[in-house]
Amino acid sequence: MNFPILSVITFIPITTGLILFMMPANRHREIRLLALAAAALALGLSLYAFLAYDTAAAGYQFVEQVPWIPRLGISYHVGVDGMSLPLVLLTGIVMFTGVMISWGIEDRPREFFAFLFVLATGVFGVFIALDAFMLLFFYELAVFPMFLLIAIWGWQVTREYAAMKLTLYLFIGSVISLVGVLAMVYTSGLGTFDMLQLEQAGFSTAFQRLWFPFVFFGFAVLGGIFPFHNWSPDGHVAAPTAVSMFHAGVLMKLGAFAALRVGIMLLPEGAHFWAPLILGLATVNVVYGALIASVQTDFKYVIGFSSVSHMGLVMLGFATLNKDGLTGAGLQMFSHGVMTALFFAVVGMVYDRAHTREISKLGGFSKVMPLVAVAFIIGGLVSMGMPGFSGFIAEFPIFLGLWQVQPVVALVAALGIIITAGYIMRVVGKVFYGEMPADLVGHISPVTRLDRVALVVLAGLLVLIGIQPWVMAPMIATGAESVLRVVGGA
Amino acid sequence: MTLPTYAPTMLTALLPEVMLLLLAGVVLMVDLIGRPRRRRGLGWLTAVGMAVALVLTLLFGRPGEETLVFGGMLRSDAASFAFAIIFLFAAAVTALLSVDVDGVGDRGEYYFLVIVATLGLCLMAAAADLIMLYLAIETASICLYVLAGYLKGNDKSTESGLKYFLFGALTSAVMLYGFSMLYGASGQTNIYLLADQVKTGGLSPLFLGGAVVLVLVGFAFKIAVVPFHFWTPDVYEGAPTPATAYISTASKVAGFAVLLRFLLAFEPSIDVSWPAVLAALAVATMTLGNLLAIVQSNIKRLLAYSSIAHAGYALIGVVALTAFGAATSVFYLMAYVVTNLAAFAVVILFARSAGSERIADYAGLSRRSPGLALALLVAFLSLGGMPPLAGFVGKFYVFAAAVDGGLTWLAFVGVLNAIIGLYYYLIVLKVVYLHRSPDEDKPIPVPRPYAVALAACIVLILLIGIASAPWLDRASAMALSLF
């Protein structure tokens, strides 16, 4: 048997979490070092898997299958394809940089990292799951650590409210999808939760049209689709920096990915039937999210709503149900994940020093934190879809795909990009240039070395994919093809 | 009727009961001759005795073919065997949880009552005859009434015992009336012979339905199904907490055991409207339990309402009246027993040193005792149905059984209830992890018996949640043996 690399990646975090709980609570330094080491190991292994994936052969690779609950046809069945492997890598990156950014947490760091790592295991597990029960198991595993992470370490003003709101939204979405999955399994008559077999179940058109909205929107709640996006800006803002990075960077992809894997791929006729609605809602996401972002006065809320806007593009890509759109959506998930992690890291660094996130009370940060300013501007350019950065590589195919199905939607959604350019430039101009307010001058300490490493890693990736798209685009294209083989219309 | 001749299955069938009787005698003797100072050992003695009985039952008490023994009084099958194991486990944990509780921990009679109640519950799960069933229910119930009112000087405990007794006596009278109707119509007291007679016809369905409703009232009281739940919060709040833990787990499971045996014996002949009645009860029980739990400020009352809600979830599995449904219900109960015992263990420990049962006083627990806070987290998240814990798989299975049985709407009601449930569990966890308290530098000591009991429960919560296949297989075997 081959080395079970996916299982090892998945269970490194939770194992580390358990070890952390057994360590004495006051050994902060050792706790942080162990967390960093575990995150580095998980990142290293996911990078190895990413490089070892055979793009020419495509399909599911590194597959492992072990019976789990044979009586119900449930197995521990994992594998990655061109769609999910980049997301595994993304999780590794965000986990690694998130630990570095969280170095300064002084309140119960043991619990913080342990809960963060339970969350990470849940995320990895969803991305590699090929069994519907397993997917739900890990999906909900990611829900409750989120609650505690935000409620305990979050922004004091809104954390209790935001944590509860976010948790309940996500839980409602996931349990509704759960009933949908059960309906699929017991209607199929196959007696299995294996998604590769359920793909072949041949559900009736009426069944697919009835159940698709439950399954798709249940998961898409976590993807931030309008009108269920409401939890996300509040949650992002209330969360501590590393959790915002995890949340916007990875968890929103969790929802989008599960909506694709379970909703679109298992109920393809339902997807074709409901695609126009998704296109419409996702367009609202893109334009409305960008508009709201541009009137925010709180730095972090700008980024929070920009995530809503960008996740709309992912959903648009899904709803095209063609190769260009799906490839773009896959790339956008990765690109946005890295970009938004970078944004939240920068916001965290600014807030930690200025103790305010009011844009009007900030200014001139490029003089004291030049590297941070450069990193944020790179993220901003990605966000606007500027050629030479990963955002362009992702958004261009999405619009290409959209043009083939609904040119009008493409035109309207393009408005979102223009608005994005507007608010990004406003924030860059206000926060990083101009005069620094007098009360901040002299109080801004430089960022730590770990912070800088994290920023360079994140910004570097955005540029790398922008100028060398071949490192990722072909892999995601194979993923899009395998989706289309199931959904039809390749 | 001829006198039954001895057969080896008779001893196998009664193995746990025989050992419990011996243990009860030993505990009383030790209490008489032991020095007062050494009486704290009684809890250990009871727990170890239960554990020994559990292991011996597992080794030698395995039932073979399903057989009626003792002239049809008891039925030796996988269900009676496995329910006995559950009761022994719950009683052992209860005994450990009682050791350091003032007013009960050093009383021999207290442990004696727990043991005899367990004996009654084991007989309940095995009873195949209406008379035996009634005697078993009364054996268990009378012990439990006394346990609930055990703290004589405490008004709330007295109220709890009296309330439990009055409600119990009333519903048991109604149930007995139902039994007498069944006997009067058929001339049979054996449940299985009765079921045969029902199958061949000859009993008026209306009369039969009326009798079954009366019987179900008695069972519904034991399970605390809405609208027979009114006793629950007051009894749970007032009773000594280890007794509450026992009543909310073992006694409730025994109620399900008789309900399942009774319903499934009659299953082929049951009127189509029964699932509708059961579904209505399940919906009402879940919803009311969960909604009322939200507003509680006392942790024991919160757990009382949550235990009502959990009975509702477990009923979902019964509604479908399929083997899979019954199996999921039994599985749910296993998960619920270990989880609820863990939750009560934390409540007892906290009350012991902080002297409070108010949820607000749990503030700062995660700083006072991180380990205890984590145990409460695991228990409450399992109650809330979060993976990788037992509660998640339990809920998943009962919802699967509902969808499998064509009751998708019931699964939807179930998941919506799960959301309400999660809400109030999270509120408690928020207090534990987030709120500050001036007592944060006072850690909560965890004496050894409590550590053992809590560790056993937590390990089982994780084990049932992660490796659920063997447990589901057991539950399926139990369910099949009831048909």
Image (cartoon, coloured by chain):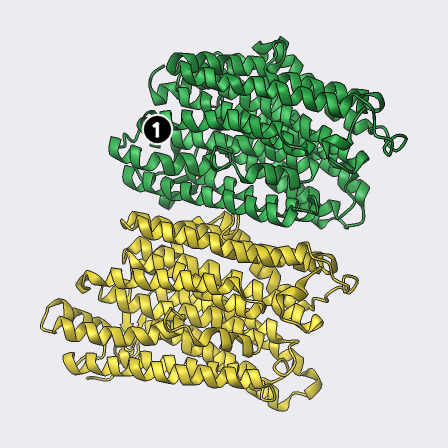
- Amino acid beneath label 1: Trp
Q: Considering depth in this image, is A458 or B93 the residue closer to the camera?
A: A458
**Looking at the image, which residue is at 9% across and 73% down?**
B202
In the image: residue A49, left or right of residue B168? right
Q: In which quarter of the image is the C terminus of chain B?
A: bottom left
**Quadrant assignment, res B154:** bottom right
Task: Give the vertical position of B33 relative to B174 (above or below).
Answer: below
Q: Residue at x 53, y 76 (%)?
A: B243
Is there any visible trace of residue A73 in the rendered image?
Answer: no
The percent coordinates of residue A263 (x first, y second) are 39, 32
Give the tally of numbered discs.
1
Rendered colour, chain A: green
Residue A287: image location, x then y, percent: 51, 24
Letter of the yellow chain: B
For image coordinates 41% across by 28% down, the residue present is A278
| Residue receiving disc 1 | A274
- Image x and y of residue B53, in percent: 49, 71
Q: Quadrant of residue A212?
A: top left
Q: Where is the N terminus of chain B found, in terms of image quarters?
A: bottom left
Q: What element carries label 1?
A: helix
Asked if residue B307 shows in the view, the reply is yes
- Determine whether A396 is above or below B165 in the image: above
Can you name the residue that lies furthest to the right here?
A442
Q: In this view, does A448 lie above or below B383?
A: above
Instruction: List x then y, in percent, for residue B359.
Output: 62, 65
Question: Badge 1: how crowded within 10 Å, few (<14), some, or many (20+)?
Answer: some
Quarter of the image for residue A243 reads: top right
